[in-house]
Image (cartoon, grey):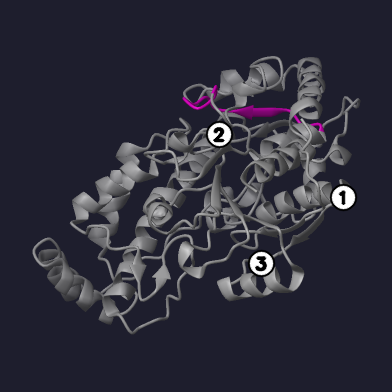
Amino acid sequence: MKSQLSKSLIILLIPYNDSDYYVNMLEGLAFVFNEIGHKAIVLTKPPSINEIKKIVAEQKIDLILSINKIIGRNEKIKTPLFCWIQDVFPGTENTLKQYLGDNEYIYTFGDPHDLGFEESPPNYLGSLITGVSKLDTNFNNEKKWDLDISFCGYIPSPLYIAKNPRFLELFYDKLFFTSKNLYQYLTCLSGPGYLTRNTHALIKGIVESTYKPLRGSLDVVLLEKKIREIICYPKKNNLVNGHLENLFSPNINNTKNLFWLIDTKIDRLIRYYVHTYPRYLDRDFLLQNVISSFPEKKIKIYGIGWDTHPRYKKFTHPHINNKHDLHNIYKLSKINLNNNTHGFGLHSRVLECINAGGFLMTHKSNSDNGPGGILSSFEENKHFGFYDPNDLYSSISEWLNNDNKRLNAVKDAQKVILSEHLWRYRANQILNDYNLIS
């Protein structure tokens, strides 16, 4: 369905951070917007709110599309903003409820409840999944593969935990559960070791006992609640010194409010354990077991962080910035492995992999049939394969040893890409929604 707009729009596209992943998605959308007669401006780095105001005024922006970032009703920007939430962090839901402007609207990557929302967000437009460019589509008629198994994506580096002097560790551990405010005050003043090693171990244990790798069942809200209950540190007000946390990137060097600084440190630590650490558990479990299951196969890992883990150094290759080179890896690998902590199979890298001519294997999740779930578009054993975390050898070998089956699966999957997952479909969805609210 094409949008019925009476004028050409000027659209500002804003990433959550300057990673290739976010910028590439916005550039894909921008290409289509420009192609169909609109003007799209892509920022390659996240701007401040004042920078957004300046661009809106100078460029006469009609619509802002941002990833994981709202502006807030207090700023009183009249230009409609569509916030595309792809990650939910501790505090995201409360921030939206309290500060979302009347002219700010929300997309979620997949079902909002699977993403971590307890309720549907305010001003909710629905699910918006990623897409690919038709120009990237590459039907692979070659029966030649340079790699047996590859994985493209980062892994968190080991978390640095400062070592307090032994007497401070004992003192803090004894004090922690009886007077947390004094504990946090003292540890903040003592430097980077604002939590003891015992507390880190406690939080880490909560995550490992709650989240099971490669099940796609991460619930960041539930996990955060469990951690805060154990460490006796409740969530504080989202608004401190005029800054909104999580979606607003507050100034962490603001020392006018010591307890705000303490809360920010605690929030950042909890965010690591509920959002980042599960990704480590997934990818470490997957690659350790694949490497041990296929010792004679050619396996390569591409991405940031892998070289900080000694056991992966012989398999690690640098992060690939060039899109063409990345697509070549997808195409020339017999098996491209994927994981997703929330279980959203229609991830950008999944669609790009298939579009480039690569065969994909991922894990099952409870989100598979919902918005953003892989079974909402693709068919198991026809377009891709599921690997079994409990039996990686058998489930991967079935595809690894059958070249014709993989090749046919890729060709069939690329037909689905062309009919459902090009960026022009997402652009039309956005323009239709703009039509409804304008």
Residue drawn at point x = 59 percent, y = 19 percent = 395
Please tell me whether mark 1 or mark 2 is closer to you in this view. Answer: 1
**CA neighbours of label 1 inside 10 A, class few (<14), some (14 to 19), many (20+):** few
Q: Quadrant of residue 57?
A: bottom right
Q: Secondary structure at mark 3?
A: loop
Q: Left or right of 227: which side holds 388?
A: right
Instruction: Give the Cα separation between the discs numbered 1 and 3.
Output: 25 Å
Check residue 361 for magenta coloring: yes
* For the residues bearing labels 1 and 3, Cβ distance under 8 angstroms: no
- Marks 1 and 2, the one that precedes in the sequence: 1
Instruction: Give the Cα separation between the discs numbered 3 and 2.
Output: 26 Å
Check residue 122 for magenta coloring: no
As drawn, 370 above or below 279? above
Residue drawn at point x = 25 percent, y = 65 percent = 196
Res. 37 mark = 1
Amino acid type, label 3: Lys
Residue drawn at point x = 40 percent, y = 81 percent = 254
Residue bearing the label numbered 2: 344
Q: Left or right of 396: which side holds 95?
A: left
